[in-house]
Amino acid sequence: MKICDALADDEERRKLTPFIANEITVFAGRDMQLRSLIQTVEQTDSPLRLIPIAAEVFGCRRAVFQEKGYAVTRWDEKVRVVVGNVSLELPSSLVKRQATPIDSASNVFEGSGVTVIVDQGPFVDRLDSYAGRPEYQEMNNEVAGTASRTISFQNPNRGAYTVATHLPAPKYVTVVIQADAHVPEQVPREIIESLRLLD
């Protein structure tokens, strides 16, 4: 795998830090994993999406290939968004898909294997219908200074999991986060913890 197109001279090559060396090791390992994955797919005749993404690391361009069509995400890069009477912090890679203010303020954000559904109003999902789902868990906690109920469960058929919270009357706010299995568990938890009421 070609990591850098060119380095100016030997002195610049000697300036490669242990961090860059580690980056090279990581991507070399990833290259081997992809080769193995490609061989497996060829044997099973299954489609495989390989998307080259150019990335800059200290002036060196490299090709990063993605098995599932999403980039390596910096989960700590966040942006605060406002939906109706609430705000919350989302990873900056998520974008708004739609707004459907029928009887409440609602929005859907998605990206990097994460879908966030924010809904408000008296007809929001109370999260009562999910008991019995695989690895279902429920806890009463406080979100945005308000008593709430947070649940989580696995979606094994989709290779994903769900974390959701509901703030009851008079707030009537429900946030549902569906995440692919590769998404760290703290990502949906931090989204819920960032929820703030604006009124």
Image (cartoon, rainbow, N blue to C red):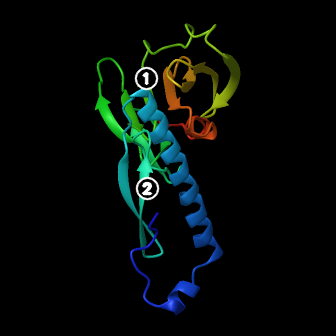
At 46% from the left edge and 36% from the top edge, which residue is drawn? Answer: 113
Q: Amino acid at mark 2?
A: Val
* Residue count near mark 1 (Cα–Cα under 10 Å), binned few <14, some 14–19, many ≥20: many
**Where's residue 174, x and y in %?**
50, 23
State whether residue 115 is above or below residue 129. Answer: below
The alpha-carbon separation of the residues under discs 1 and 2 comes to 39 Å
Mark carried by residue 155: none
**Where's residue 180, x and y in %?**
51, 32
Secondary structure at badge 1 equals: strand
Residue identifier under label 1:
120
Residue identifier under label 2:
64
* Residue count near mark 2 (Cα–Cα under 10 Å), binned few <14, some 14–19, many ≥20: some
At 44% from the left edge and 27% from the top edge, which residue is drawn? Answer: 44
Q: Nearer the viewer, mark 1 or mark 2?
A: 2
Among the two numbered marks 1 and 2 on one chain, the one whose residue lies closer to the N terminus: 2
**Where's residue 186, x and y in %?**
63, 40
Q: How many marks?
A: 2
Secondary structure at badge 2 equals: strand
Residue 196 left/right relative to 93:
right
**Where's residue 193, x and y in %?**
61, 38
Q: Amino acid at mark 1?
A: Gln
Which quadrant would residue 24 be assigned to in this image?
bottom right
**Of 63 and 138, which appears nearest the observer?**
63
Which quadrant would residue 145 be assigned to in this image?
top right
State whether residue 154 is above or below residue 84. Answer: above
State whether residue 129 is above or below residue 41. Answer: above
Instruction: Work out whether residue 76 can be spotted.
Output: no
